[in-house]
Amino acid sequence: MAKKTPEQLAQEFEGRKAKGLAKGGAAFWPNIIANAVLKLTQQRAAITPDTLIEMIEREAPTLEITVRSGAAEAVARLKQAIAKGS
């Protein structure tokens, strides 16, 4: 079996790391939506898909990287639900 170069090993590691982050973040999306709903309820604001998406996108950059990927998943699922409802 041929030995891999350090560059090949680093590339494989980055690929596995990205895949792991995506899988880990996928578990967070229901909690992210629930937290956004709770915050909007506390503010007595209207809870619509658009306001949820806006709130999640506004807060996502401040989150930990794994949770940030969950926020992206939550936004994608909300947009998919809107598209199905149209």
Image (cartoon, rainbow, N blue to C red):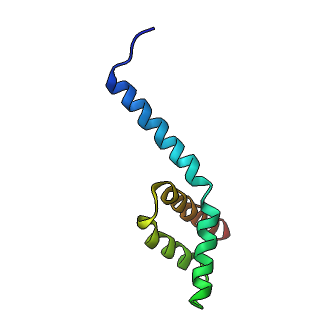
> In the displayed structure, would residue 14 be above or below residue 40?
above
Give the farthest residue toward the top.
Answer: 1
> In the displayed structure, would residue 67 be above or below residue 15?
below
Quarter assignment of residue 61: bottom left
Counting every numbered tag in the picture gives 0
Task: Answer yes or no: is residue 46 visible.
Answer: no
Residue 44 locus on image (x, y percent): 60, 91
Q: Residue at x 62, y 85 (%)?
A: 41
Task: Answer yes or no: is residue 18 visible.
Answer: yes
> In the displayed structure, would residue 29 be above or below residue 9?
below
Residue 7 locus on image (x, y percent): 32, 26
Describe residue 17's horizontal placement relative to residue 23 as left or right: left
Q: Residue at x 33, y 24 (%)?
A: 6
Name the image quarter holding the N terminus: top left
Q: Return the residue nearer the eye: 18 or 50.
A: 18
Q: Residue at x 60, y 61 (%)?
A: 29
Quarter assignment of residue 3: top left
> In the displayed structure, would residue 45 be above or below residue 60?
below
Give the farthest residue toward the right.
Answer: 85
Give the farthest residue toward the bottom.
Answer: 44
Residue 71 locus on image (x, y percent): 52, 62
Residue 40 locus on image (x, y percent): 58, 83
Q: Residue at x 64, y 72 (%)?
A: 34
Name the image quarter holding the C terminus: bottom right
Describe residue 49's horizontal placement relative to residue 65 as left or right: right
Q: Return the residue nearer the eye: 85 or 35.
A: 35
